[in-house]
Amino acid sequence: MSSTTQTHDASIGAPVVEAPRGRRAHTRRRHDVGFWAVAFAFLAVMAFATVPAPLYVIYQARDGFPTFTTTIVFAAYGVGVVGSLWLAGHLSDVHGRKPLILVSIALELVAAVLFLVWNDVSGLIVARLVTGLGIGTLTATATAHLGELRVRATGDEGSAKGASVAAGVVNLGGLSLGALVGGALAEFVGQPLLVPYAVFVVALVVAFVVVLVAPETVGRPEQRVPYRPQRIQAPAGKGAAFWAAGTGAFAALAVQGLFTSVAPTFLGTTFHVTDRLAAGATTFGVFAASALSQVVFARLAQRTQIRLGMVLLVVGLAVLAGSAVVLQVAGFIGGGVVAGAGVGLLFRASIGSAGALAEPEQRGGVLATVFLIAYAGLTVPVVAVGAALLVLPTLPVLIGYVVLVSVLAVVAGVRLAARA
């Protein structure tokens, strides 16, 4: 049986009746269940985003298109993400977190159906564009929603930090899981260009249903707020910290972009590794290391995490490039995994730093801006690599990529550590 408690408000000299304990407990349980529902949906959507990574080699062998076409297909995904973040990534601050997450899942379902029924090159481009639109709608919204749900479930503002770790793990862990599932299904189940997408149609339907039970955490304004696209600008007076976070996120996802686009093709053409599961496992290893490092090193001071992430990323990329020179596939993959561990720490520090710069009512918009910069890092360098491969040998292009990303990571890491 629930009971009520009374506290005394000295300003008006009257007792204030608080909500019954039973009701508060029920509300906290709802937010706790909502947290896990949104986390599952976040995981499912991010996993779906990398399912095609180990399948590009199959499409390429079937249709005979060059590596540059693969980068175009991948670029369509990036354009979708960036465009969605710019146009809609901040709208959850006004219209609520839950509706935007449901829209995102619906877009991923449309993309999955497109993969099933229209799988030539033009269909791949359209499907990846739609996938990107859903991811852009989801990332900042789900990240903000998870933090708010966790705080309301625990009643502790400090729990937002733990939710930030969870969001980072789900984000990058989902990307790793999708590549592994896609590669495994392609290798061991018939119809490799159909079954992975059919499996995710089911997973996404489940995700849509469970999000329906999640509580909303944003109240809609009483007056209509005029629509405008996301402004790419720092919060007032916090420009240096904001752009340090944006540069770190850009560099981190530039590494991930390499392993979700041309790296599987690079494994097949340079190292002659054509096993579909191996291609998916390579991408899985990089993203899984990104997710795992955030958990393993969570207790370290933030400044230490940033410095460690910067070192791991640069050393891993150096090993990767050196292994490409001497044609050591184990070193290529191992270097990617080490770099991935650094990516996880640098990416989480960047997102956490950006989120801390904004008040709650602006947090979705600020996070959307940083994710927009991050996904530009996922897309622009990869397209540049694809274009460069049309006129230059693979090795100098890869080394140039490694040098550029390493420099950006060091610049961002030093600045983030100084402000930690």
Image (cartoon, rainbow, N blue to C red):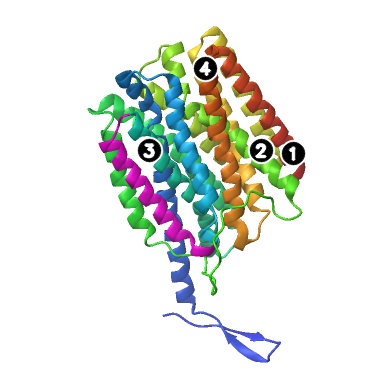
Do tag 2 and tag 1 residues touch (Cβ < 8 Å)?
Answer: yes
Residue 247's disc is 2
Q: Quadrant of residue 14?
A: bottom right
What's the residue at 70%, 43% (across, down)? Answer: 243
Q: Is residue 329 left or right of residue 60?
A: right
What's the residue at 23%, 28% (across, down)? Answer: 191
Decide which of tag 2 and tag 1 comes sooner along the chain.
2
Question: Is residue 113 found inside the magenta-colored segment of the image?
Answer: yes
Residue 122 on image: x %, y %: 35, 32
Q: CA distance from mark 4 to mark 1?
A: 33 Å
What's the residue at 60%, 41% (across, down)? Answer: 373
Q: Check disc 3 and report the residue beneath it.
A: 126
Q: CA distance from mark 2 to mark 1?
A: 10 Å
Graded by Cα atoms within 10 Å as few (under 14), some (14 to 19) or many (20 or more), the crowding at tag 4 reads some
Looking at the rendering, the stretch of residues picked out in magenta corresponds to 94-120
Q: CA distance from mark 3 to mark 4?
A: 24 Å
Q: Check disc 1 and report the residue beneath it.
A: 415
Which residue type does callout 2 highlight? Answer: Thr
Q: CA distance from mark 4 to mark 2?
A: 25 Å
Residue 189 on image: x %, y %: 24, 28
Where disc 1 sits, the SS reads: helix
Q: Check disc 4 and report the residue beneath it.
A: 389
Where disc 3 sits, the SS reads: helix
Which residue type does callout 3 highlight? Answer: Val
Residue 146 on image: x %, y %: 51, 55
Decide which of tag 4 and tag 2 comes sooner along the chain.
2
Do tag 3 and tag 2 residues touch (Cβ < 8 Å)?
Answer: no
